[in-house]
Image (cartoon, rainbow, N blue to C red):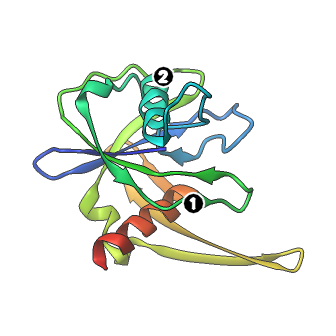
Amino acid sequence: MLVPIVMREQPTVLLTERTKHLSNHSGQIAFPGGKADKEDADASATALREAEEEIGLDPALVDVLGVLPHYVTGTAFIITPVIALVQPGFALNPNGYEVADVFEVPLEFLMNPSHHRRHAFEWEGVRREWFSMPYQDKSAQRFIWGATAGMLRNFYRLLSA
């Protein structure tokens, strides 16, 4: 997964809304990214390739800083978040099959712990916990939750350490 930080006057994080017909995580807010291909050299190569395929982000405008520790979801997906800086001025071309929308959220908002909401419930005797970071932009209420919010929370904790 690419965690693309757009280097605007006030940095933003580029996120996608997945289309509603996808079998996994349909309609959810996500980072661009996906499964590694055997040709990918590493997690960074996967993240850059997937971001180009999903939203048309030119890898030449992306400067990879490094990776966060693996993130394991409750549904057993293992994700390697790749942190990168993106030069503004890009033109995106989202893949309409996978991506319903692409938008940016101020990094300052996402790194503010007062916007990190913790949720919990018990299902079949197992307690499940997750974070959300609801964000209202000019066009819609964006409910960032689950793995995306969890990885952002981990990034916050790393930066605040």
Of residue 66 and residue 81, the one placed in the foreground of this image is 66
What residue sits 27% from the left and 57% below the top? 107
Q: Name the residue under label 1.
A: 71
Q: Which residue lies furthest to the right in this view?
A: 124
The location of residue 154, given as percent across then percent down, is 44, 68
Residue 27 to residue 121: above or below? above
Give the image quarter of residue 56: top left
Give the secondary structure at mark 2: helix
What residue sits 49% from the left and 26% below the top? 54
What residue sits 15% from the left and 53% below the top? 10
Residue 145 to residue 35: above or below? below
Of residue 21 and residue 45, the one placed in the foreground of this image is 45
Give the secondary structure at mark 1: strand
User: Which comes sooner in the sequence, label 1 or label 2?
Assistant: 2
- Say left or right for 3 vs 84: right
The location of residue 25, given as percent across then percent down, is 66, 45
Of residue 4 and residue 133, the one placed in the foreground of this image is 4
The mark closer to the camera, 1 or 2, is: 1
Residue 120 to residue 34: above or below? below
What residue sits 34% from the left and 23% below the top? 92
Q: Residue 111 carries which label?
A: none
Residue density around tag 2, few if under 14, some if 14–19, many if 20 or more, within 10 Å:
some
Amino acid on which the number 2 mark rests in the picture: Glu
Amino acid on which the number 1 mark rests in the picture: Tyr
Q: Residue 53 carries which label?
A: 2
Which image quadrant: the C terminus?
Answer: bottom left
- Say left or right for 137 vs 18: left
